[in-house]
């Protein structure tokens, strides 16, 4: 990981800094969304804390089980070296959802309502966090001006592709939150869109393949899409006709949305290439 600076034994890494910024920014956005929908700030804050911890643990577990199980079973001491990389975003999502569901039961608040509030901030946080990632993509077949030189090779900046798509998803979910059809709609849209985004970016990354150009990550993304579609069909049938359960004046018009999206992309691209390039 790219080290920015250090204070004696304390080392500050770019990825860690961006993850912290992502949690703070996405969390603050989720808290604000929760307040608009009558959810106490403490509820969302506790949810964020639980989801972050569960997400990291699940991401590590999935990576061990799906990407390199033989290595970690032969070298169990390596399991705890999370600072050396090895996280599966799919595992993080699954474990975060399970932890959030358990928390919603204990808090006696609708899981789908909490999920709809959370995923908008999560999409924003994922985009910000990905800016600090230093797991680059495949070597470029042709020279492109946005390629990044790493160890003498020109690589695809897969992180850039992903955080741009994450920001687009964030804007889509934010705008949709003012006119959703049913509780859980944003959550399902997020699951399906995230899986598609990850599937697209995966073509530019190096991961164990299972058939042709398709990797384990593609298989996990396909599973998420199928699950998401099944849940969407089930939930949508519970809503009579085209009645919407939640309609509010959209405070973010199309022009403002585009400006916010461009600002996020430009700032993130600048920071990414300034530090990583």
Image (spheres, rainbow, N blue to C red):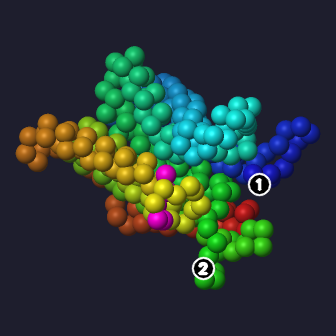
Q: Is residue 214 magenta?
A: yes
Q: Nearer the viewer, residue 207 or 212?
A: 212
Q: Is residue 203 magenta?
A: no
State the residue at coordinates (65%, 34%): 73
> Which image quadrant for residue 132?
bottom right
The residue pinned by badge 2 equals 141
- Residue 104 x %, y %: 38, 23
Which residue is painted at 55% across and 38% down in the image? 65
| Residue corresponding to mark 1 | 2
Contact (Cβ within 8 Å) of mark 1 with mark 2: no
Can you see residue 93?
A: yes
Classify 10 Å Cα crowding around label 2: few (below 14), some (14-19), many (20 and above): few
| For marks 1 and 2 on the same chain, the one whose residue lies earlier in the sequence | 1
Left or right position of 44 against 81? left
Say which quarter of the image contains residue 134.
bottom right
SS category of the residue bearing label 2: loop
Mark 1 against mark 2, which lies toward the viewer? 2
Residue at the (79%, 45%) spot, across then down: 12
| Residues shaded magenta | 212-216
């Amino acid at each position: 990981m790219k080290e920015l600076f250090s204070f004696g034994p304390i080392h500050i890494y770019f990825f860690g800094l961006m993850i912290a910024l992502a949690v703070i920014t996405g969390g603050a956005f989720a808290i604000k969304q929760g307040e608009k929908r009558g959810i106490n700030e403490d509820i969302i804050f506790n949810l964020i804390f639980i989801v972050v911890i569960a997400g990291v643990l699940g991401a590590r577990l999935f990576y061990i089980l799906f990407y390199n199980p033989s290595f970690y079973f032969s070298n169990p001491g390596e399991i705890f070296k999370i600072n050396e990389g090895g996280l599966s975003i799919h595992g993080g999502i699954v474990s975060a959802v399970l932890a959030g569901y358990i928390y919603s039961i204990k808090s006696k608040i609708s899981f789908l309502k909490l999920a709809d509030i959370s995923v908008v901030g999560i999409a924003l946080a994922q985009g910000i966090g990905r800016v600090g990632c230093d797991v680059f993509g495949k070597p470029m077949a042709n020279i492109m001006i946005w390629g990044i030189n790493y160890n003498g090779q020109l690589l695809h900046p897969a992180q850039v592709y992903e955080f741009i798509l994450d920001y687009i998803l964030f804007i889509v979910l934010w705008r949709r939150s003012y006119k959703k059809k049913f509780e859980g709609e944003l959550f399902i849209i997020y699951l399906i869109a995230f899986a598609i985004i990850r599937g697209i970016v995966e073509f530019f990354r190096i991961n164990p393949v299972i058939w042709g150009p398709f990797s384990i990550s593609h298989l996990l993304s396909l599973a998420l899409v199928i699950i998401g579609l099944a849940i969407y069909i089930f939930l949508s049938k519970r809503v009579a006709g085209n009645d919407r359960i939640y309609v509010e004046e959209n405070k973010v018009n199309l022009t403002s949305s585009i400006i916010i999206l461009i600002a996020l992309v430009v700032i993130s691209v600048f920071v990414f290439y300034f530090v990583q390039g």
